[in-house]
Image (spheres, rainbow, N blue to C red):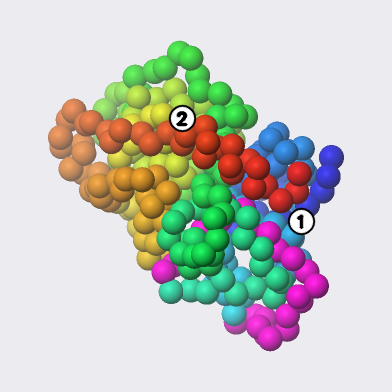
Amino acid sequence: MRKVKVFSATVGESFGKTTENFGDNLMADILQDVFSVEPTYVEPARAELIGVGSIIDAYYRYSRKKYVFWRKRPWRTLHVWGSGFMNSGTPALWPQRLVFDAVRGELSKARVAPDRDIALGDPAILLPLIWPKKVVATSEVVVIPHFVTYQTFLERYGTSLPRHWRVLNLLGDPRKICEAISASELVISSSLHGLIVADAYGVPSIWMEPHGKIKGDGFKFADYFSFRGAPLPGPVDFDSLLAAGTVAGNAPAVPSAETIDRLLRSFPFR
């Protein structure tokens, strides 16, 4: 199995020894199961590939106080495949030479490759290729707080949810998380990847207001919605959803077979 050096926001060289965030964790399964590539997680300046995550601007956001930006390494190439920006005003600044094979949405494309016809889509839309949608669905409503606000959400609502509502912890096994989402009748999420995966599996969703501060200025959501083709209303206050009693989700935007195929063909390490 070919090895590729990958940078991911929360995943380090100790990958597999600690619990990782769902979105950042997904690259391992996608690379191994779809492309037969084994990721070796490295620091940003050594990476050959970035994929799932709002990390096109990660080197600037994480490293501008640690590294000198003029220390370029043009002999190294960093492939960007399905990543997006976290913020609206931060640059795609890395010591490596950047090659944009695919980005998350139209807004990221406008910033890095406005005149090129590159593939669009977050790699998480490929998850049904690895773990197909469960045939037997449940009546569960799956509530997905952003992982940094999970404990706060659980302390506030854990004992007062309707009987068929389930809170999902994104610091868990990616396969089990996808199975829970794919089998549900509705996803309510403040996590972007909760919404992306709901669309991938054809599950209605609601964009929920986070219960605490999360990174970013909202660009990553707008970027995904530009790919999705229709914005999700919100973010919606969770208390208003509880008070409403019966909750109807927004229709899923399932990626087309053509979109999936183009993202697959754009992968740079085939």
Towards the viewer: 169 or 154: 169
Q: Which residue is drawn at 41% across and 29% down?
A: 202
The amino acid pointed to by label 2 is Tyr
Q: Which residue is drawn at 51% across and 47% down?
A: 121
* Quarter of the rendering containing residue 205: top left
Mark 1 lies on residue: 5
Apparent side of residue 198 relative to residue 116 in the rendered image (left or right): left
User: Label 1 to label 2, Cα distance in Å?
Assistant: 29 Å
Point out the residue furthest to the right here.
1
Q: What element carries label 2?
A: loop
Magenta span of residues = 65-88
- Residue 130 visible? The answer is yes
Q: Is residue 73 magenta?
A: yes
**Whole-percent x, y for residue 270 in the image:** 76, 44
Image height of 65 relative to 218, above or below: below
The amino acid pointed to by label 1 is Lys
Towards the viewer: 189 or 32: 32
Q: Residue at x 60, y 74 (%)?
A: 93
Apparent side of residue 122 relative to residue 223 in the rendered image (left or right): right
Mark 2 lies on residue: 201
Asked if the residues shown at circle 1 and circle 2 are in contact, with their CB atoms under 8 angstroms apart, the answer is no
